[in-house]
Amino acid sequence: MTKRLITCIALVLILVSLSAAVPSSTSKKIDGNESLSQSINPANMSTPIDSSLKIDSPEHREINVQELKIVDSGFHQATGISRFGFILKNLNETAGYRISKYQVSAYDNVGRVLGTFESLIQFLFPGERIGIVGYLNIPEDARIDHIQIQVIDGDPIEPKVAKNLLSVENLNYIQDRYAPKVTGVINNSANQTMENIDVSVIFFDETGRLSDGLETHVNFVPAAGKSAFEISSYGTKSPSRMEAFAESSDWSIQQA
């Protein structure tokens, strides 16, 4: 009897020692105050984690957005005519902007608002530089001292076409006592017809200052073709230099 009791005690001691050697499982709860990284230790995982791994698919790639920048501006005021012009640069080389907004305000020398103008910029391509021209309704006896231009960035997108496929060539200022004008040719390097083309021509004087501007509209430019345009320049001074820009106001240019 004593021998059997000793044997039972020995078996119990063996079982206790074995259970102490086996690690117990954790039931630690992950709540809102504890991060998952604290609850799961990568050092205990059989597969190492590569901390340099990054997702680079189009669905997850972030666009590095930068602001649109006004790089030059000016205005022209003559009897019955007041115009403004400015050049806008998209500093982002990978993202375009859709439906940006701008507002122009003209002031006299005591800070009184003489007139305002606001509109939309339908699209800017990555890294694109565009010229914008518009008219101000200014009282006849008032004199513009300065203008203020404000731009609100539109929605950043990655367009299917990397750059504007419209350009202007053969730009000329034609002197005439009664009907001076600017003429030029829009070149379309896309394989489809471009419609609703807005053309802006920026004037610079002999000092390099932006001094005036003109604008017009062209209905279409054929695929891989050209279209000529002319703009009346009545009330302008002959510029020392001109720069012209052509932009399509529809979305077809993004799928060219």
Image (cartoon, grey):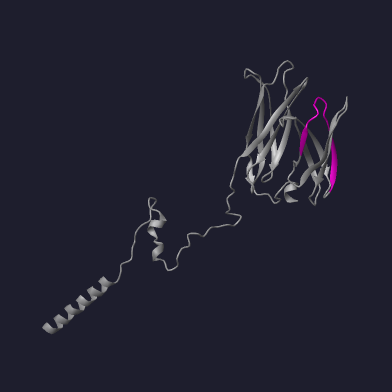
178 shown above or below 95: above
Residue 169 percent location from the top left of the image: 81, 42
Where is residue 203, by image quadrant?
A: top right
Q: Residue at x 84, y 37 (%)?
A: 229
206 left or right of 3 in image: right
Query: Going by the picture, which residue comes out furthest to the front?
Result: 207
Residue 75 percent location from the top left of the image: 71, 27
253 shown above or below 46: above
Residue 170 percent location from the top left of the image: 83, 40
Q: Is residue 237 magenta?
A: yes
Q: Is residue 253 visible?
A: yes
123 shown above or below 53: above
Q: Nearer the viewer, residue 72 or 136?
A: 72
Query: Going by the picture, which residue comes out furthest to the left?
Result: 2
Q: Residue at x 67, y 28 (%)?
A: 104
Q: Is residue 71 magenta?
A: no
Q: Which quadrant of the rendered structure holds the N terminus?
A: bottom left
- Please provide the residue range marked out in magenta: 225-244
Where is residue 139, by image quadrant?
A: top right
Q: Nearer the viewer, residue 183 or 118?
A: 183
Where is residue 246, by image quadrant?
A: top right
Q: Is residue 1 visible?
A: no
Q: Residue at x 82, y 29 (%)?
A: 233
176 left or right of 167 in image: right
